[in-house]
Amino acid sequence: MDSITPLFDAIWDDYMFWSIVVGAVAFGWLYHHSFFYRAKEGESPNIDDLEVGVFPKEYDNLRLEVAWTVLPFILIVWLTYISWAPLDAVWSQTGPDGYHGSECEEGQSSNNYIDSSGYVRSDCYHDIGIEGQQWFWEFDCYGLSEELCSTGYATVEGELKPHLILKTGETYLATMTSIDVTHAVKNHDFGMMEDVVPGQVTYLWMPAVEETSFLMLCAEYCGDNHAYMTAQISVE
Protein backbone atom coordinates (compact mmCIF):
# COMPACT_ATOMS: atom_id res chain seq x y z
CA MET A 1 0.00 0.00 0.00
CA ASP A 2 0.98 3.63 -0.22
CA SER A 3 3.57 5.00 2.18
CA ILE A 4 0.97 7.18 3.93
CA THR A 5 -0.77 4.10 5.32
CA PRO A 6 1.96 2.61 7.57
CA LEU A 7 -0.59 1.26 10.06
CA PHE A 8 -2.13 -0.96 7.40
CA ASP A 9 1.32 -1.99 6.13
CA ALA A 10 2.36 -3.01 9.65
CA ILE A 11 -0.79 -5.11 10.13
CA TRP A 12 -0.28 -6.74 6.72
CA ASP A 13 3.27 -7.71 7.72
CA ASP A 14 2.09 -9.10 11.08
CA TYR A 15 -0.72 -11.13 9.51
CA MET A 16 1.60 -12.52 6.83
CA PHE A 17 4.23 -13.47 9.44
CA TRP A 18 1.78 -15.30 11.70
CA SER A 19 0.08 -16.95 8.72
CA ILE A 20 3.44 -18.40 7.67
CA VAL A 21 4.22 -19.54 11.24
CA VAL A 22 0.82 -21.19 11.79
CA GLY A 23 0.87 -22.73 8.31
CA ALA A 24 4.36 -24.15 8.84
CA VAL A 25 3.38 -25.70 12.19
CA ALA A 26 0.05 -27.12 10.99
CA PHE A 27 1.21 -28.49 7.64
CA GLY A 28 4.59 -29.57 9.04
CA TRP A 29 2.80 -31.60 11.70
CA LEU A 30 0.43 -33.04 9.09
CA TYR A 31 3.17 -34.15 6.70
CA HIS A 32 5.34 -35.50 9.52
CA HIS A 33 2.55 -37.70 10.86
CA SER A 34 1.46 -38.74 7.36
CA PHE A 35 4.87 -40.23 6.64
CA PHE A 36 6.18 -41.16 10.10
CA TYR A 37 3.15 -43.27 11.02
CA ARG A 38 2.67 -44.82 7.58
CA ALA A 39 2.74 -48.62 7.58
CA LYS A 40 5.63 -50.20 5.75
CA GLU A 41 4.95 -52.09 2.58
CA GLY A 42 3.57 -55.55 3.26
CA GLU A 43 2.76 -54.78 6.91
CA SER A 44 -0.67 -54.24 8.44
CA PRO A 45 0.10 -53.41 12.06
CA ASN A 46 -2.75 -53.16 14.50
CA ILE A 47 -1.06 -50.74 16.88
CA ASP A 48 -4.40 -49.70 18.39
CA ASP A 49 -5.47 -53.31 19.06
CA LEU A 50 -8.72 -52.72 17.22
CA GLU A 51 -11.42 -55.31 17.88
CA VAL A 52 -14.86 -55.65 16.38
CA GLY A 53 -17.49 -54.28 18.75
CA VAL A 54 -14.91 -52.69 21.09
CA PHE A 55 -14.21 -48.98 21.35
CA PRO A 56 -10.64 -48.16 20.26
CA LYS A 57 -8.05 -46.87 22.70
CA GLU A 58 -8.23 -43.23 23.72
CA TYR A 59 -5.06 -41.18 23.53
CA ASP A 60 -5.17 -38.21 25.89
CA ASN A 61 -2.51 -35.54 26.27
CA LEU A 62 -3.87 -32.77 28.45
CA ARG A 63 -0.88 -30.47 27.96
CA LEU A 64 -1.11 -30.77 24.19
CA GLU A 65 -4.85 -30.11 24.17
CA VAL A 66 -4.49 -27.08 26.44
CA ALA A 67 -1.65 -25.69 24.33
CA TRP A 68 -3.60 -26.31 21.11
CA THR A 69 -6.51 -24.31 22.57
CA VAL A 70 -4.77 -21.54 24.51
CA LEU A 71 -2.03 -20.56 22.05
CA PRO A 72 -4.38 -19.94 19.08
CA PHE A 73 -6.70 -18.02 21.42
CA ILE A 74 -3.85 -15.75 22.51
CA LEU A 75 -2.84 -15.22 18.87
CA ILE A 76 -6.41 -14.30 17.87
CA VAL A 77 -6.68 -11.83 20.75
CA TRP A 78 -3.34 -10.25 19.76
CA LEU A 79 -4.30 -9.90 16.08
CA THR A 80 -7.65 -8.41 17.08
CA TYR A 81 -5.89 -5.91 19.34
CA ILE A 82 -3.46 -4.65 16.68
CA SER A 83 -6.31 -4.45 14.15
CA TRP A 84 -7.83 -1.63 16.20
CA ALA A 85 -4.95 0.71 15.30
CA PRO A 86 -6.15 1.75 11.81
CA LEU A 87 -9.76 1.92 13.02
CA ASP A 88 -8.64 4.24 15.79
CA ALA A 89 -6.90 6.42 13.19
CA VAL A 90 -9.85 6.47 10.77
CA TRP A 91 -12.37 7.24 13.53
CA SER A 92 -10.23 9.74 15.42
CA GLN A 93 -12.30 12.35 17.23
CA THR A 94 -11.88 16.07 16.76
CA GLY A 95 -10.43 18.36 19.36
CA PRO A 96 -7.34 18.19 21.60
CA ASP A 97 -7.77 14.46 22.30
CA GLY A 98 -7.84 13.53 18.60
CA TYR A 99 -4.97 13.02 16.19
CA HIS A 100 -5.82 16.09 14.12
CA GLY A 101 -6.73 18.75 16.66
CA SER A 102 -9.50 21.26 15.96
CA GLU A 103 -10.57 23.06 12.80
CA CYS A 104 -7.85 25.30 11.37
CA GLU A 105 -8.18 29.05 11.76
CA GLU A 106 -7.78 31.20 8.66
CA GLY A 107 -4.17 31.06 7.52
CA GLN A 108 -3.31 28.13 9.80
CA SER A 109 -1.70 24.98 8.37
CA SER A 110 -2.24 21.37 9.42
CA ASN A 111 1.50 20.57 9.28
CA ASN A 112 0.65 16.87 9.30
CA TYR A 113 3.27 14.16 9.72
CA ILE A 114 3.54 10.45 10.47
CA ASP A 115 4.72 9.71 14.01
CA SER A 116 6.85 6.77 15.12
CA SER A 117 3.74 4.65 15.74
CA GLY A 118 2.45 5.11 12.19
CA TYR A 119 -0.35 7.56 13.02
CA VAL A 120 -0.86 10.73 11.00
CA ARG A 121 -0.90 13.70 13.36
CA SER A 122 -1.94 17.26 12.54
CA ASP A 123 -2.03 20.64 14.24
CA CYS A 124 -5.53 21.22 12.83
CA TYR A 125 -7.79 20.22 9.92
CA HIS A 126 -9.86 21.77 7.14
CA ASP A 127 -13.54 20.98 6.45
CA ILE A 128 -14.65 19.88 2.98
CA GLY A 129 -17.83 18.24 1.65
CA ILE A 130 -18.51 15.14 -0.44
CA GLU A 131 -21.96 14.28 -1.80
CA GLY A 132 -22.77 11.00 -3.52
CA GLN A 133 -25.53 10.28 -5.99
CA GLN A 134 -26.16 7.77 -8.76
CA TRP A 135 -23.52 7.74 -10.19
CA PHE A 136 -21.50 10.84 -9.47
CA TRP A 137 -19.39 12.46 -6.75
CA GLU A 138 -19.66 16.15 -5.95
CA PHE A 139 -17.02 18.04 -3.94
CA ASP A 140 -17.34 21.25 -1.93
CA CYS A 141 -14.33 23.17 -0.55
CA TYR A 142 -16.53 25.15 1.87
CA GLY A 143 -14.90 28.47 0.98
CA LEU A 144 -11.28 27.36 1.47
CA SER A 145 -8.68 29.16 -0.61
CA GLU A 146 -7.75 27.59 -3.95
CA GLU A 147 -4.30 26.92 -2.53
CA LEU A 148 -5.83 24.59 0.05
CA CYS A 149 -8.68 23.09 -1.97
CA SER A 150 -10.06 23.39 -5.48
CA THR A 151 -12.48 21.43 -7.62
CA GLY A 152 -12.93 20.85 -11.32
CA TYR A 153 -13.00 18.02 -13.83
CA ALA A 154 -10.35 15.60 -15.06
CA THR A 155 -10.36 13.27 -18.05
CA VAL A 156 -10.32 9.65 -16.90
CA GLU A 157 -10.32 6.99 -19.63
CA GLY A 158 -11.86 9.45 -22.07
CA GLU A 159 -14.60 10.66 -19.70
CA LEU A 160 -14.86 13.78 -17.57
CA LYS A 161 -14.82 12.98 -13.86
CA PRO A 162 -15.00 15.26 -10.80
CA HIS A 163 -11.56 16.37 -9.69
CA LEU A 164 -10.57 17.35 -6.14
CA ILE A 165 -7.18 19.01 -5.65
CA LEU A 166 -5.74 19.17 -2.13
CA LYS A 167 -2.52 20.54 -0.67
CA THR A 168 0.36 18.44 0.60
CA GLY A 169 0.83 18.63 4.36
CA GLU A 170 -2.81 19.45 5.08
CA THR A 171 -5.46 17.25 6.72
CA TYR A 172 -9.09 17.40 5.65
CA LEU A 173 -12.26 16.19 7.35
CA ALA A 174 -14.87 15.32 4.74
CA THR A 175 -18.53 15.73 5.71
CA MET A 176 -20.36 13.23 3.51
CA THR A 177 -24.00 12.79 2.47
CA SER A 178 -25.97 10.87 -0.15
CA ILE A 179 -29.09 12.06 -1.95
CA ASP A 180 -30.33 8.64 -3.07
CA VAL A 181 -28.82 5.28 -2.06
CA THR A 182 -25.87 4.09 0.01
CA HIS A 183 -22.46 4.75 -1.51
CA ALA A 184 -18.98 4.36 -0.03
CA VAL A 185 -15.99 6.62 -0.51
CA LYS A 186 -12.81 4.58 -1.01
CA ASN A 187 -9.57 6.56 -1.02
CA HIS A 188 -6.91 4.00 -1.84
CA ASP A 189 -3.84 6.18 -1.29
CA PHE A 190 -5.22 7.52 1.98
CA GLY A 191 -5.95 3.96 3.13
CA MET A 192 -9.48 4.94 4.19
CA MET A 193 -13.07 4.08 3.31
CA GLU A 194 -16.42 5.10 4.77
CA ASP A 195 -20.08 4.60 3.83
CA VAL A 196 -22.18 7.51 2.62
CA VAL A 197 -25.73 6.83 3.79
CA PRO A 198 -28.88 8.67 2.66
CA GLY A 199 -30.47 10.64 5.48
CA GLN A 200 -27.27 10.56 7.56
CA VAL A 201 -24.06 12.57 7.78
CA THR A 202 -20.83 10.59 7.95
CA TYR A 203 -17.24 11.78 8.21
CA LEU A 204 -13.91 10.72 6.74
CA TRP A 205 -10.38 11.88 7.51
CA MET A 206 -8.28 12.64 4.42
CA PRO A 207 -4.66 13.31 5.47
CA ALA A 208 -2.76 14.63 2.43
CA VAL A 209 0.70 13.71 3.72
CA GLU A 210 2.51 13.52 0.39
CA GLU A 211 1.99 14.23 -3.30
CA THR A 212 -0.15 11.63 -5.00
CA SER A 213 -2.93 11.18 -7.54
CA PHE A 214 -5.50 8.39 -7.54
CA LEU A 215 -9.08 7.48 -8.37
CA MET A 216 -11.64 7.73 -5.59
CA LEU A 217 -14.02 4.79 -5.97
CA CYS A 218 -17.44 3.79 -4.75
CA ALA A 219 -17.04 0.64 -2.65
CA GLU A 220 -20.76 -0.04 -2.07
CA TYR A 221 -22.87 -1.41 -4.93
CA CYS A 222 -25.27 1.38 -5.87
CA GLY A 223 -26.81 0.43 -9.21
CA ASP A 224 -26.02 -0.17 -12.87
CA ASN A 225 -23.13 2.30 -13.19
CA HIS A 226 -21.58 1.61 -9.80
CA ALA A 227 -18.26 0.57 -11.37
CA TYR A 228 -17.98 3.93 -13.15
CA MET A 229 -18.68 6.10 -10.12
CA THR A 230 -15.16 7.49 -9.80
CA ALA A 231 -13.43 10.79 -9.17
CA GLN A 232 -9.86 12.03 -9.40
CA ILE A 233 -8.05 13.03 -6.18
CA SER A 234 -4.79 14.94 -6.52
CA VAL A 235 -2.48 16.08 -3.75
CA GLU A 236 -0.06 18.76 -4.95
Image (cartoon, grey):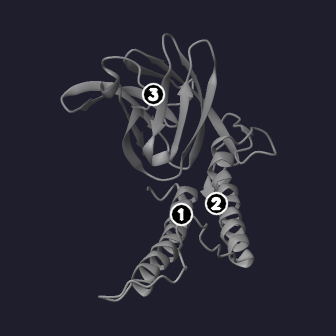
Q: Which residue is labeled 3 in the image?
A: 220
Residue 79, disc: 2
Q: Residues within 10 Å of mark 2 (few under 14, many from 20)?
A: some
Q: Earlier in the sequence, mark 1 or mark 2?
A: 1
Q: Position of residue 162 (x, y in %)?
A: 36, 25
Residue closest to the eye, 234 or 77: 77
Q: Position of residue 93 (x, y in %)?
A: 74, 39
Residue closest to the eye, 178 or 141: 178
Q: Earlier in the sequence, mark 1 or mark 3?
A: 1
Q: Position of residue 187 (x, y in %)?
A: 46, 40
What residue is shown at x 68% (from left), y 76% (from top)? 64
Q: Is residue 228 left or right of residue 57?
A: left
Residue closest to the eye, 149 or 14: 14
Could you tell me if residue 107 is visible in this image? no
Image vertical order of residue 191 relative to residue 60, above or below: above
Task: Tell me which amino acid carries mark 2.
Answer: Leu
Q: Is residue 18 left or right of residue 116?
A: left
Q: Quadrant of residue 6?
A: bottom right
Q: Is residue 193 left or right of residue 90?
A: left
Residue 15, disc: 1
Q: Earlier in the sequence, mark 2 or mark 3?
A: 2
Q: Which quadrant is the N terminus positioned in?
A: bottom left
For marks 1 and 3, give the CA distance: 26 Å
Task: Tell me which amino acid carries mark 1.
Answer: Tyr
Q: Residues within 10 Å of mark 1 (few under 14, many from 20)?
A: some
What residue is shown at x 69% (from left), y 37% (from top)? 104
What residue is shown at x 40% (from left), y 49% (from top)? 212
